[in-house]
Amino acid sequence: MRERIEAAIREALPGVNFVVERPATMAHGDYSTNAALVSKTDPHELAGKLKIDGVEKVEVVGRFINFFLSADALKPQEREVPQVYGGKTILVDYTQPNPFKPFHIGHLMSNAIGESLTRLFEKVGATVVRVNYQGDIGPHVAKALWGLMELKLDAGNIEDLGKAYVAGAAAYEDNPAAKTEIDGINQRLYKNDPALRSLYEEGKQTSLKHFDDIYRALGTKFDRLFFESETGPIGLQIVEAHKNLFEQSDGALVFKGEQYGTHTRVFITSKGTPTYETKELGLVELKQKEFPFDVAVTTTSGEQNGFFQVVEALVPLIWPTLKDRYIHVSHGMMKFASGKMASRKGNVITGESLLKDLTEAARGREDVAVGAIKYTVLKPGNGRDIIFDPEKSLSLEGDSGPYVQYALVRTRALLRKAADAEVGKSDFPRTTPLHRILIHYPDVVARAAKEMEPHHVVTYLTELAAAFNSWYAAERLIIDGKVSSGNLELVQAVEKTLAHGLHVLGIPTPEEM
């Protein structure tokens, strides 16, 4: 319907830029336009020209024109999501946990946002490539290897691997002799010392296997894992080939970003090792070579905004065709409501420990816990900090993942009961707020994909779930073994939309709760 309204306005006002959108309240109709305002046209005169099939009433409020759809236009039916990225290839790089280190809250947040973005892009027609870039070389690895050797721990055991990293990180800060040893191990890693190879590979594979278990719980499967050990050498070659973009500074090679609106960053240290920035250049090269893309999106913490400002300034200087096509989407920090969440052992709460503890709080329902976490992460919008309250995140009373999941479960329970009922005559043209909400779902998905903001879908599903629960409380679907075809079609449409929307968010869609 939005397309029909837009077409009618374009015919009446050729060449005018306007928007047709959902009004803030249903009292103002199903769609509204600012066309009269932006064109400085008399709204009553314009409204009189707009004769649109499926629009029952056109109303002028100030300089805006509101459209009320007919009952037939509101009837549940298959509505296609606009294919705004049809024919495009979009690469999404997300999660990025480092082998030899814990899976942190930030990795969980990056995964929730990245997985939802991939699904949104797919729904609007894009071919999506899921990749995961991980730091498998550097000081953190050296710290873990030092801990494994010093404490004689098992690199094939994920618990021992965690203990080794903690021991190495503490020793690096507190013990000068250990710091020297760890720095030496780091240099040996970059030189591919065969004496470290076996221990290194065992520890790396242990980490990756553990991460795979977490990905399965989160509903993610990657097309490619990239590692810093492979991007570093490529990045060094790129810097060498574009030395005109860099300057010497105290033995290091730096990029003076101030002239490009950003800041100075080191790309090659005084010891000749590549920094994260140089490795990122190698990653850009590999991504293009293996997966020629139209757009590449990377989701990380907002703490890396400065890093990506430099990368986004430098990338088009090396690859001009990538200007505005190598994009960073950031997330905020997760904080915990006072007194609501604490690790049993007093340690920093990791992403995996949060998932485990919330699963226990949800009586063993990992699907409910995943829904609670992802909803909480996606709800505020990208870049915003989150206050995580475990009790509220699991609530069935509203504004939570389980609340929307439970609304879906209710629709499915009703449909199972209705399967044995006699279907009676449709009760149309009677319409409900549910009908008026359902028509907007395709546009919500398209908007969320274009803006790279899954929170639009979160807000929509919460509204739909609330409207369905109100309808459910007031309406008896089955009376004397009969169900009206109109009500049955409505519940079917709500079930399909809730299931589709939760899938887009990467939230499980349970049959029962």
Image: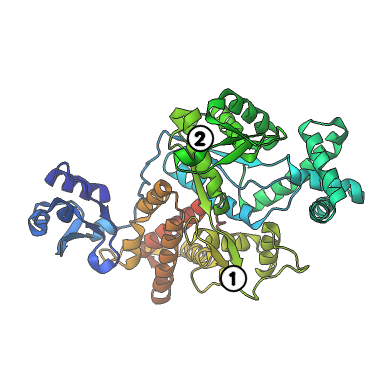
User: To which quarter of the image does residue 497 belong?
Assistant: bottom left
Badge 1 is on which residue?
Answer: 389
Q: Residue at x 85, y 36 (%)?
A: 196
Residue type beneath disc 2: Leu
Comparing 347 with 307, the one in front is 307
Seen in the picture, residue 248 relative to 154 is either above or below; the reply is above
Find numbered disc 1 in the image and state the secondary structure of the residue it sits on: loop
Which element type, helix, strand or loop, lies under badge 2?
helix
Instruction: Say above or below: 320 vs 512.
Output: above
Q: How is the image coloured?
A: rainbow
Q: Quadrant of residue 247?
A: top right
Residue 19 at x, y percent in the picture: 25, 51
Disc 2 or 1, which lies upstream in sequence?
2
Looking at the rendered image, the disc whose residue lies closer to the viewer, 2 or 1, is 2
- The residue under the point 91% across, 51% down is 151
Residue indicated by mark 2: 314
Residue lying farthest right? 152
Relative side of 200 to 390, left or right: right
As shown in the figure, which amino acid type bears the numbered disc 1?
Asp
